[in-house]
Image: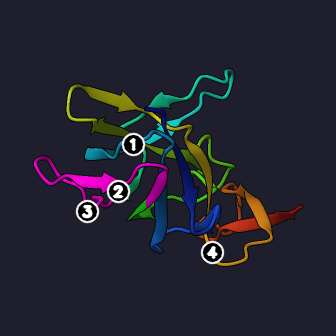
Amino acid sequence: MAVTAVITLSNYAGVSNQTQTVTCTVTNTGAAAVNVVTIRPMKYSTPDSGTTISANSTLPVSLGMPPVQQGQNVTVPASGTLAIAWDMVPFMSGLNMQGEASAFPYFYLGCVIRYTDGTSFTELTPTPVRFWCQSQPNAAVLYAKCDFTNPENSYLLACESLVA
């Protein structure tokens, strides 16, 4: 029994507050069917200084639930595949509260799959995929550099957009 999984996204870049679809395609190359018992969506961040992808429950993204819940087996046939999809909504932009490029304008999405061949349970974690969150559709502005120090009109905000 060899079971693998791949995560794909409907879009690898999207807009804050807009629904995106995450799809996990489970492939069974074995001679017998397997049952997917649960799929737990995960969100991950990568520290600026490293390459280790780590689970991060504080990332501002809402993850939907896949249509596979505990006690509700979904069968992946022998030598077959099964695509399981759920939604996610990011609530972030490429800017932080100071108008600077955010430390996490992107994050990674993945899942943990639990399946059984009828004799034992196995967990599988496919490689997470990167999602870039834009503050507006087709944003050409990567970030804005803002000057909050205007001595004559302190209530005005002067911003200079920096375009890639």
Instruction: Determine whether the residue tagged by mark 2 lies in a helix, strand or loop.
Output: strand
Q: Residue furthest left?
A: 71
Mark 1 / mark 2, whichever is N-terminal? 1
Q: Distance from label 4 to label 2 (Cα)?
A: 20 Å
**Magenta stretch in the rendered image:** 63-82
**Is the Cβ of the residue at disc 1 closer than 8 Å to that at disc 2?**
yes
From the viewer's side, name the closer residue of 131 and 2: 2
Residue at image mark 4: 136
For marks 4 and 3, give the CA distance: 30 Å
Q: Residue 126 at what x, y percent from top left?
A: 51, 38
Foreground tag (4 vs 1): 1
Q: How many marks?
A: 4
Residue 16, percent from left and from top? 51, 68
Task: Check residue 71 for magenta coloring.
Answer: yes
Using the image, determine if residue 103 lies above or below residue 76. Answer: above
Q: Indicate the amino acid at tag 1.
A: Met
- Residue 14 drawn at (x, y percent): 60, 68
The amino acid type of the residue labelled 2 equals Leu
- Frontmost of labels 3 and 2 is 3
Q: CA distance from mark 1 to mark 2?
A: 8 Å
Q: Nearer the viewer, mark 4 or mark 2?
A: 2
| Residue 155 visible somewhere in the drawing | yes
Viewer-side label of 3, 1: 3
Instruction: Quote the CA–CA distance across marks 4 and 1.
Output: 25 Å
Q: Which residue is mark 2?
A: 63
Determine which residue is flagged by label 1: 42
Q: Main secondary structure of the magenta part?
A: loop
Q: CA distance from mark 3 to mark 1?
A: 15 Å
